[in-house]
Image (cartoon, rainbow, N blue to C red):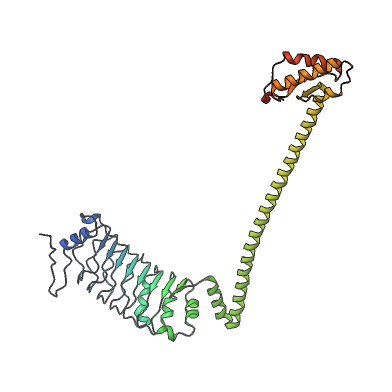
Amino acid sequence: MPFRRVVEKDEDGFPRMTKAFIQSLCKKHKLYHTPHLNDVLYLHFQGFAKIENLDEYTGLKCLWLESNGIRRIENLHNQPLMRCLYLQQNLIKKIENLDVVPELDNLNVSNNSIERIDNLECLTKLGTLQIAHNRLRCAQDIRGLLDCPSLSVLDLSYNQLDDPEILSVLQEMPNLHVLNLMGNPVVKKIKNYRKTVICAISGLRFLDDRPVFPKERACTEAWQRGGLEAEREERKRWNEREQQKIMDSVNALTALRDKAKATVADRAATSDGEDDVENEMETTSSDNGEDEAKTTGDLVVTSDLPGLEEIDDDDDDEAEETRTEEESASSFAGEQKWVFPVHQQSKDIIKPLIEEIEDSPVLDFDDVE
């Protein structure tokens, strides 16, 4: 038969946070079976009414207790390394017993029944407090925030705050950077709400649903000094600076483009110059070759031997013999070129050279220079 987990319940019918139950949840979430090795524990959505039996989980740094029926913050004395505690959507009425978790950095007690912020002086490292959807009403209810100067993120949204004097409390918080007051009646009671809050809290970087940019802060502070006219002038100066910044970026890109074009043009000019030099060298080499050929007297004679027709030879028999030998050599060489030195184009030298053709080997066409 499959294993069925037996849930022990308290006198009110709520499931109890027993050791066996916690062990089964560790197995479900693939955590360590040995308690002190776990640095996170998921105990949310279980219907617990009380925090208990966590003594062995001494290494916890993050504890999820969301959406239970917990009425009190208690029994955390063996979790000195706790950094994050999530207790939203429970039945808590008071912030208490947190002096045993001095390393706490993030506390979420939203959607509870808290009517007053107290007992935060022991949390010297608390940076984030989420206490939305509770029962805070006036400035006195949130004055306990001043006992925790390390707070930088504060969510007070959707409470019942309707006293504009809460600004006098909030502006005394030295490290407040993020504030959410949405859903409180006080938002409608503070004239020029956003500008007023930004001016009141000098370090504010995010208000409600959007950030506070330097431009907005500068314009708001100008509005505080000189009204709408001063705000318009300040906004105009910021717009001009932003436009100038854009133009500087465009000019920088244009300069890069022009530089790239100039580089390409220089390379093209250099390449053309090299081609001209190479062509000139080839031309010079060709001219030198022709001069050398003239100097050495090398002569390329094909099967046509045009020079022979111009030889004025009285002896017809010798001319006929020469032509016959030429045709024979041409037929034998297959229209190949014959290269042999000629020192003087005269009939006295051509004739003996023609006679030497018979004894000369036929050169391969690829060897002819």
- Quadrant in which the N terminus appears: bottom left
Q: Number of marks in the image?
A: 0
**Residue 93, picture quadrant:** bottom left
The residue positioned 43% from the left and 80% from the top of the image is: 167
Report whether residue 349 is seen. no
Residue 83: % across, % down: 32, 62
Specify whether 369 is left or right of 98.
right
Report whether residue 295 is seen. yes
Specify whether 338 is left or right of 147.
right
Q: Is residue 210 above or below residue 228?
A: above
Nearer to me, 187 or 267: 267
The residue positioned 25% from the left and 72% from the top of the image is: 67
Nearer to me, 183 or 98: 183
Q: Is residue 167 above or below residue 332?
A: below
Q: Is residue 275 above or below residue 323?
A: below
Residue 17: % across, % down: 18, 66
The residue positioned 78% from the left and 28% from the top of the image is: 289
Residue 139: % across, % down: 38, 81
Specify whether 148 is left or right of 329.
left
**Residue 58, picture quadrant:** bottom left
Specify whether 301 is left or right of 66.
right
Residue 269: % across, % down: 73, 46
Q: Is residue 367 above or below residue 41?
A: above
**Residue 326, picture quadrant:** top right
- Quadrant in which the C terminus appears: top right
Nearer to me, 245 or 232: 245
